[in-house]
């Protein structure tokens, strides 16, 4: 094989056909030059284009690696990669493949006994990285497995220089096949040599210069820009390797490596990277924070956005002392900056960074109450200035980013301000803003009210065509967070906005909204149901607490009825139950959204009986309840949801017209499950007299479920009066006998309200069912009613026992 030396390469530059048979062949054919298939870049001169086309022809007809290298080296000297267009890159790729540049890099790093190893390692590295950089500009090539296989090698070059020998992160670079897509990268004389023949060449170890480092980073940036690129880089050890390059201040590590690492840590791969490398990334964060604190003036403001990329996601490493120290130090620098006079462009990144720090550490490290109030005030001012614009005004992407950060500051202050303002005479709980006074809390609540009025104004102008806009979702979510805490303020404005709120939530739940961009944004932000992808129900989930409050008030509830809000809630519950069914055999975590939706539906059943009787969505709900409750009775972790469904079904049952003849299977199945569920809440003292206690199965949930249980018992009494057949079922299921036995042996019930609820249900049975009245009266007359049963005066009167 012909030796390709540096001298030969340089000679070929001056005389393109002197050493390359493929180039000389054109001359033998009469001097006709192969016509260019495409013009290869506007920046090339005619002579460059001519030589480039000859090189491409030679590359296509290369018989071995020597010919391929000669042509490639000429191309890299004639035309920079940035001036090569995609068709030209495609021709190079088809002729060479991605395996050849891979082998060039391996040869340069590890050495080889092949003939081409006589090329200086610097040439091999330069050619290999330049070729890969050029090819990576095409996304199809950047995602090719052969190019991805070079990622560990490139990372190793950037972190450790070309002197690395083994242990490149991710995989063995010599394990790749030795042929390109069309065979152009193959040949009898491999550039890569082989794993066993690789030799150390310490005397000729090349140094990674700036141009080669730039090519390496260009390739990695091209991979990172792919949809699955961050995951590809993470799986190949990019985080620890780039951290090492930055720590050792390798070539371009600050200019290129740090931004690339920031990109990896700011998308979907953020949480995974932090969970895998917490200590390493905390050390990097401390280093970046130190640079931020050392910067002055505008330079420090410019670094706010970069610093945010290196903060961990909330919930990861939050207990770390190192992270707390970094957050506290950053607040020390941010306080005087926030108090200074800044332009809107300057204050934006500062507020967004403050929001990120609040997500990580809350208000405690932020500073004294006066500063915290100032921060909230500045955020609210920015929101009002940004949203209170005339209709049709377009909000720039930069301003949207700022306002989204302001929303987070407002939400962080909202819960504390509301609770402090309402708890005037009570001992307040530990405040989120340490030391804030009641007067300061009221002032914060006032500025928050004005800012949320601006959100209402903005959302009132949103057209359905913008339902897929991530900024609209962020604004909607922030308003819902406020409504979950505060519904007394701006009541008329909120009621007027209900058509938008319901319409927006319905469009996303039913899949009617153009939410492709929103789905992508939610995926990037790792927002989804149970860690999953965007499903469309998130909008309604955020609105549910507000609906629970608003459905309890006459005015808003009438509007909600006109908007068919109950049908929307039933659809949400149906989908939630379908998802729970799909987890058969798998641990089923609580779903607070389902419980809140049931609470809102319960408000409608209590206050709007005519709607319950006439709206077909409640028939759909009854069918769902008859299927769900018998299953949930046997799932202790979902006891609160079962309590919601049980009480909701009983409240609906009391409003249904009486049926003649035997009950249908669905209602009978539901009431049987309801009776079993209600009977499990209390347990007697055992063989000796004593107090009745909450059962062990209910004890952990009693604080949340006791009101639902009592309301369910009251509704059971109403069902017995409305459905005569139910009395017989109560006796068949053993609920009556079991309850009477419990009350006989128990000296007292857990509290008076529990006794009143049981007594009301027993009175209803005694009034509507002679057999039940006889059984209850017999127990009382037998002289064994010395326990809690004997103290039920209304029940004694109903059954005629003195």
Image (tube, helix red, strand yellow):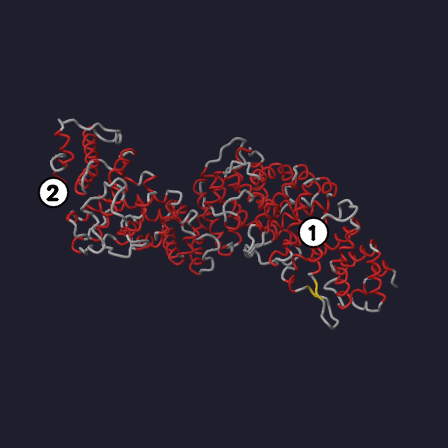
Dots 2, 1 in contact, CB < 8 A: no
Q: Residues within 10 Å of mark 2 (few under 14, many from 20)?
A: few
Q: Residues within 10 Å of mark 1 (few under 14, many from 20)?
A: many
The residue lying toward the viewer, choosing from 407 and 545, is 545
Q: Residue at x 73, y 68 (%)?
A: 691
The residue lying toward the viewer, choosing from 310 and 625, is 625
Q: SS class of the residue under badge 1? A: helix
Residue holding disc 2: 7
User: In what quadrant of the picture does the N terminus appear?
Assistant: top left
Q: Earlier in the sequence, mark 2 or mark 1?
A: 2
Whether residue 56 appears in this view of the structure is yes
Cα separation, mark 2 vs mark 1, equals 91 Å
639 vs 616: above or below: below
The residue lying toward the viewer, choosing from 202 and 210, is 202
Whether residue 440 appears in this view of the structure is no
In the rendered structure, the answer to whether residue 363 lies left or right of residue 303 reads right
Residue 541: x %, y % from top left: 58, 46
Residue 158: x %, y % from top left: 28, 50
Q: Residue at x 12, y 43 (%)?
A: 2
Residue holding disc 1: 670
Give the number of callouts.
Answer: 2
């Amino acid at each position: 094989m012909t030796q390709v030396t540096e001298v030969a390469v340089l000679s070929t530059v001056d005389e393109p056909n002197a050493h390359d048979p493929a180039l000389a062949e054109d001359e033998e054919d009469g001097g006709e030059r192969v016509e260019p298939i495409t013009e290869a870049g506007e920046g090339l001169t005619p002579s460059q284009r001519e030589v480039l086309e000859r090189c491409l022809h030679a590359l296509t007809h290369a018989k071995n690696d020597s010919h391929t290298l000669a042509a490639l080296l000429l191309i890299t000297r004639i035309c920079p990669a940035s001036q090569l267009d995609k068709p030209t890159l495609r021709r190079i790729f088809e002729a060479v493949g991605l395996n050849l540049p891979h082998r060039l890099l391996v040869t340069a790093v590890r050495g080889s006994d092949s003939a081409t190893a006589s090329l200086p390692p610097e040439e091999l590295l330069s050619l290999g990285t330049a070729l890969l950089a050029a090819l990576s500009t095409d996304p199809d090539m950047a995602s090719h497995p052969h190019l991805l296989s070079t990622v560990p090698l490139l990372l190793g070059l950037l972190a450790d220089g070309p002197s690395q020998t083994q242990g490149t992160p991710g995989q063995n670079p010599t394990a790749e096949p030795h042929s390109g897509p069309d065979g152009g990268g193959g040949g009898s004389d491999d550039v890569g040599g082989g794993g066993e023949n690789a030799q150390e060449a310490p005397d000729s170890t090349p140094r990674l210069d700036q141009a080669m480092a730039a090519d390496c980073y260009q390739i990695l940036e091209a991979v990172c820009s792919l949809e699955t690129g961050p995951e590809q880089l993470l799986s190949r050890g990019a985080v620890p390797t780039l951290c090492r390059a930055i720590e050792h201040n390798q070539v371009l590590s600050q200019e290129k490596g740090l931004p690339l690492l920031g990109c990896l840590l700011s998308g979907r791969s953020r949480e995974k990277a932090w969970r895998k490398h917490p200590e390493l990334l905390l050390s990097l964060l401390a280093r970046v924070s130190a640079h931020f604190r050392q910067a002055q003036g505008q330079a420090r403001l410019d670094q706010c956005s970069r610093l945010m990329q290196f903060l961990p996601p909330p919930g990861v490493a939050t207990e770390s002392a190192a992270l707390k120290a970094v957050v506290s130090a950053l607040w020390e620098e941010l306080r005087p900056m926030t108090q200074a006079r800044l332009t809107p462009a300057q204050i934006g990144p500062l507020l967004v960074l403050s929001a990120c720090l609040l997500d990580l550490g809350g208000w405690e490290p932020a500073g004294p109450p006066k500063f915290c109030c100032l921060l909230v005030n500045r955020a609210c001012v920015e929101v009002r200035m940004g949203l209170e614009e005339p209709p049709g005004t377009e909000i720039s992407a930069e301003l949207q980013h700022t306002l989204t950060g302001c929303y987070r500051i407002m939400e962080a202050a909202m819960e504390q301000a509301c609770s402090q303002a309402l708890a005037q005479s009570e001992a307040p709980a530990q405040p989120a803003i340490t030391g804030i006074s009641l007067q300061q809390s009221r002032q914060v609540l006032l500025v928050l009210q004005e800012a949320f009025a601006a959100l209402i104004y903005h959302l009132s102008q949103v057209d359905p065509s913008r339902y897929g806009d991530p900024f609209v979702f962020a604004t909607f979510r922030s308003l819902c967070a406020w409504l979950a805490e505060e519904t007394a303020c701006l009541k008329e404005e909120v009621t007027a906005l209900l058509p938008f709120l319901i319409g927006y939530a319905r469009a996303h739940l039913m899949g009617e909204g153009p939410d492709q961009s929103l789905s992508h944004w939610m995926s990037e932000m790792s927002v989804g149901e149970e860690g999953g992808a965007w499903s469309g129900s998130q909008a309604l989930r955020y609105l549910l607490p507000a609906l629970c409050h608003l459905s309890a008030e006459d005015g808003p509830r009438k509007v909600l009825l006109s908007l068919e809000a109950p049908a929307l809630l039933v659809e949400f519950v149906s989908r939630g139950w379908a998802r729970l069914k799909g987890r058969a055999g798998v641990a089923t975590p609580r779903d607070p959204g389902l419980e809140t939706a049931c609470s809102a539906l319960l408000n409608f059943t209590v206050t709007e009986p005519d709607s319950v009787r006439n709206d077909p969505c409640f028939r759909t709900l009854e069918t769902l309840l008859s299927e769900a409750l018998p299953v949930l009775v046997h799932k202790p972790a979902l006891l609160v949801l079962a309590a919601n469904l049980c009480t909701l079904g009983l409240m609906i049952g009391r409003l249904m017209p009486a049926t003649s003849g035997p009950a249908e299977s669905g209602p009978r199945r539901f009431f049987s499950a309801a009776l079993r569920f209600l009977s499990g809440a209390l347990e007697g003292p055992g063989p000796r007299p004593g107090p009745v206690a909450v059962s062990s199965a209910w004890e952990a949930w009693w604080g949340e479920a006791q009101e639902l249980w009592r309301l369910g018992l009251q509704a059971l009494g109403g069902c017995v009066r409305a459905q005569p057949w139910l009395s017989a079922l109560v006796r068949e299921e053993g609920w009556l006998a079991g309850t009477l036995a419990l009350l006989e042996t128990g000296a007292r019930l857990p509290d008076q309200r529990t006794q009143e609820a049981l007594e009301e249900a027993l009175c209803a049975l005694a009034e509507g069912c002679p057999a039940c009245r006889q059984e209850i009266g017999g127990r009382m007359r037998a002289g064994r009613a010395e326990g809690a049963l004997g103290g039920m005066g209304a029940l004694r009167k109903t059954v005629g026992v003195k």
